[in-house]
Amino acid sequence: MIKDPELHELVEMETREILTQYEYDGKEAKFVKGSALCAVNGTDPELGEKKILELLDVMDKYIPLPKRPIDKPFMMPIESTFTIPGRGTVITGTIEQGKIKAGDEVELVGYSRKTERTTITGIETFRKQLDYGEAGDNVGVLVRAWQREHVFRGNLIKFR
């Protein structure tokens, strides 16, 4: 953390110039000066925790949420798979479009294989159970009928 206020101002001016040079709006860019280390360690809350909360407020205010195609049919490319013994196969990926919930029937397509169908039995993201997943979410979907050995990165699951 830079302690000298004059040096702070100089660094900010240079950063604004670089942003402008790369065709960003350097004049209107928002800066929040703080210390993540202080926030993590619980020291100097004025510089740590309060600045992290201020940063989150600035991000919420100035960074727009991306448009997500949730009105289209569900489609998710498969990134990886793993097995939970006694529960089934978990397929992970980022939902490209649409929405999915437990109980929905989906198809596995790709690699010139015969299309196979199954039912989603659960949806999670970062160890948190979800009621549904939608476009833009990185999720793991639990299925029972498909074996991990038959589901590959690059396959696609979509609504039946």
Image (tube, helix red, strand yellow):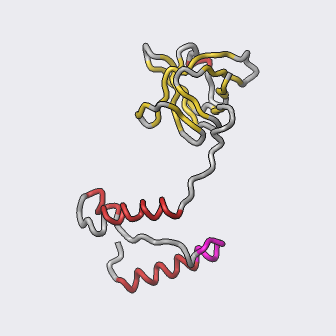
> Residue 53 at what x, y percent from top left?
36, 61
Residue lying at the far left of the rendered structure: 43
Residue at position x 49%, y 71% from top?
A: 30
Please determine whether, in this image, residue 21 is positioned above or below residue 126: below
Whether residue 81 is visible here, answered yes or no, is no
Horizontally, residue 26 falls left or right of residue 113, namely left
Q: Image quarter for residue 32?
A: bottom left
Quadrant showing the C terminus? top right
In this picture, which residue range is highlighted in magenta?
A: 18-25
In the image, what residue occupies the spot 50% across and 82% down? Answer: 13
Reply above or below: 24 against 123.
Answer: below
Q: Say if residue 6 shows up in the picture.
A: yes
Q: Which residue is outermost to the right?
A: 112
What residue do we see at 43% from left, 31% from top?
129
Query: Per the image, is 31 magenta?
Result: no
User: Is 160 left, or right, of 44 in this rendering?
Assistant: right
